[in-house]
Amino acid sequence: MNIVYGKLDGFSNSAKNFINDWYSHVTPDNLHICDGTQAEKKMLIAKLLENNTLVKLNKYYECYLARTNPLDVARVANKTFMCTSNKKSSMTIGKEGCKETIGQWADAKETRITLKKYFKGCMKGRTMYVIPYCMGALGSPIAKAGIEITDSAYVVVSMGIMTIMGDCVLPYLKESFVKSVHSVGLPLPLNANAKEIDNSWPCNP
């Protein structure tokens, strides 16, 4: 592992196994273990500014503009699935032959196999970020602690806004935790007719 920032000390064995497994599968050049510090946040924002992913709005304190790719939206209904071992546990089942209008179901085990194929080698040439995070107050019985793996510095900064993230979460990452994996989906082999990639917002929706 080529760890360029942070360290794996303090992660549970289960968390380390999760990180090692995906590191080997997505084959990034570098590994960044997020600690959630202000210094890390400033470093990542500086990188995003340099890549033109963010534009600083000088008249507002710590405010930035992100011009996303219109193709890369938060959610596309026909590509969103609820994956469980039992369809009845996640959604109402209508009459046979009727298509669900508020969601789609897929078998969890089959989906994991399919997604692993898509993710193979997807972070080559990039940095893999490991984000320990918690949704809700630390120590709350209803809080959910997890790890998100991504190759997007923008996602790391956003998770720092939306969640509690960093070293403070490590004591709450037990053997069972929420496991999340995300990738921008690039680089990809390009053919002669491929459009130029917008490096300020790489995506492959």
Image (spheres, grey):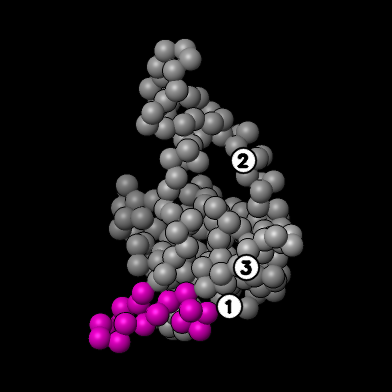
Q: Is residue 30 magenta?
A: no
Report the amino acid beneath label 1. Answer: Tyr
- Which secondary structure lies at badge 1? strand
Instruction: Based on the picture, tell me whether residue 60 belongs to the magenta stretch.
Output: yes
Looking at the rendered structure, the kind of residue marked 3 is Glu
Q: Nearer the viewer, mark 3 or mark 1?
A: 3
Q: Is residue 30 left or right of residue 99?
A: right
> Which residue does the numbered mark 1 point to in the structure image?
5
Mark 3 or mark 1: which comes first in sequence?
A: 1
Distance between mark 3 and mark 1 Cα atoms: 31 Å
Q: Residues within 10 Å of mark 3 (few under 14, many from 20)?
A: few
Whether residue 14 appears in this view of the structure is yes
Which disc number belongs to residue 51? none
Badge 1: how crowded within 10 Å, few (<14), some, or many (20+)?
Answer: few
Q: Are marks 3 and 2 in contact (CB under 8 Å)?
A: no
Earlier sequence position, callout 3 versus callout 2: 2
Residue that extends furthest to the top in the rendered view of this protein: 96
Above or below residue 171? Residue 84 is above
Q: Position of residue 81 (x, y in %)?
A: 48, 37
Q: Are marks 3 and 1 in contact (CB under 8 Å)?
A: no
Residue 112 marker: 2
Question: Residue placed farthest to the front in the image?
Answer: 193
Q: Which residues are magenta?
A: 49-65
Please tell me in which quadrant of the rendered image residue 199 appears.
bottom right
Q: Which residue is painted at 30% across and 58% down in the image?
A: 137
- State the separation of the CA atoms marked 2 and 1: 29 Å
Question: Which comes sooner in the sequence, label 2 or label 1?
Answer: 1
On the image, the x and y values in percent for residue 185 come to: 61, 58
Disc marking residue 196: 3
Residue at 48%, 56% in the rendered image: 71
